[in-house]
Amino acid sequence: MNTTIYLMRHSEATPKTNLKYVSCKDNSQVVNEKAFLSVSGEKRAEEISKNEELQNIDAVYSSNYVRAMSTAKYIALENNTIVNIDDRLDERKRGNEGNLDPKDFERLQKKDFDFKMTGGESLNQTKKRMAEAMKSILMFETGNRVVVVSHSTAITALLTTWCDIGYNYDDDIILSYNDNAIVDGNWDFPHVIKLEFEGTTIKNIEYLSIM
């Protein structure tokens, strides 16, 4: 039986430059988890929920991050269903980067999928838990049309299961399936990728340009 999964990156979050923490004891990981959608991000999430491709959805799943849940709620409302929260769909945890420049951290991790910082996750660890979440969804939602809202790095890690891997001039990961670009280093808000399965076997992957 065929199952269709729309793997979606969340809508646009409020830029950090628009926030001022007067008093906040949260560490960087918790701050990241709490990041909420911008006003335009809320509008875009609502607009995309009304797209024809995302109608007649049987189930909606989301990571435990606020920006992902806030994106998923519109699709769930449009399709008269609930949002299922699964923290295995969370973004890759960066951990303590110390004095390492964030750009160097990204570069090192994209070249070595086992590289990680203290308290963080490697891309292979992220890939493993994302794959476990997808396996569970395919088991419970066999034959259904499902939306899964997650994050760019976590989605990239998962897609390396089926896609060919390359790199652009900025060392961003490029993913293709049957010679068609799925991820080219640039991410939309939201970014929607359609996965079609027969049982647990992938049959097709395509990037959807939903504007």
Image (cartoon, grey):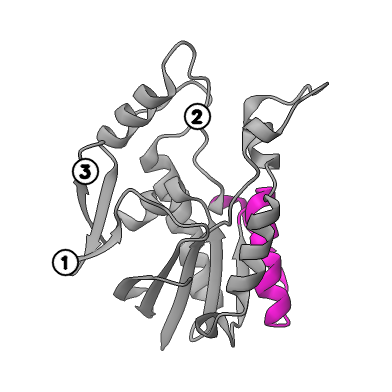
Q: What residue type is labelled 1?
A: Asp
Considering only order in the chain, which callout, 1 or 3, is on the residue closer to the N terminus? 3
Q: What stretch is highlighted in magenta?
A: 63-88
Residues at circles 3 and 2 in contact by the CB criterion of under 8 Å: no
Q: Name the residue under label 1.
A: 179
Label 3 vs label 2, nearer the camera:
3
**In which image quadrant can residue 63 be found?**
bottom right
Q: Mark 3 points at which residue?
A: 168
Q: What element carries label 3?
A: loop
Q: Which residue is drawn at 52% across and 84% down?
A: 144
Q: In this view, does 182 lie above or below 15?
A: below
Q: In this view, does 41 lie above or below 103?
A: below
Whether residue 136 sits left or right of residue 78 in the image: it is left
Residues at circles 3 and 1 in contact by the CB criterion of under 8 Å: no
Query: Residue farthest to the top?
Result: 99
Q: Mark 2 points at which residue?
A: 120
Q: Does the magenta stretch include residue 8?
A: no
Q: Residue at x 62, y 39 (%)?
A: 15
Q: Where is residue 52 in the image (x, y as percent from the top left)?
A: 53, 85
Image quadrant where one finds the N terminus: bottom left
Q: Is mark 1 on a helix, strand or loop?
A: loop
Q: Position of residue 164 (x, y in %)?
A: 20, 56
Q: Mark 3: give few (<14), some (14-19) or many (20+) Cα within 10 Å.
A: few
Considering only order in the chain, which callout, 1 or 2, is on the residue closer to the N terminus? 2
Q: Mark 2: give few (<14), some (14-19) or many (20+) Cα within 10 Å.
A: some
Q: Does the magenta stretch include residue 65?
A: yes
Visible residue check, residue 122: yes
Q: In this view, does 87 lie above or below 72?
A: above
**In which image quadrant can residue 72 be found?**
bottom right
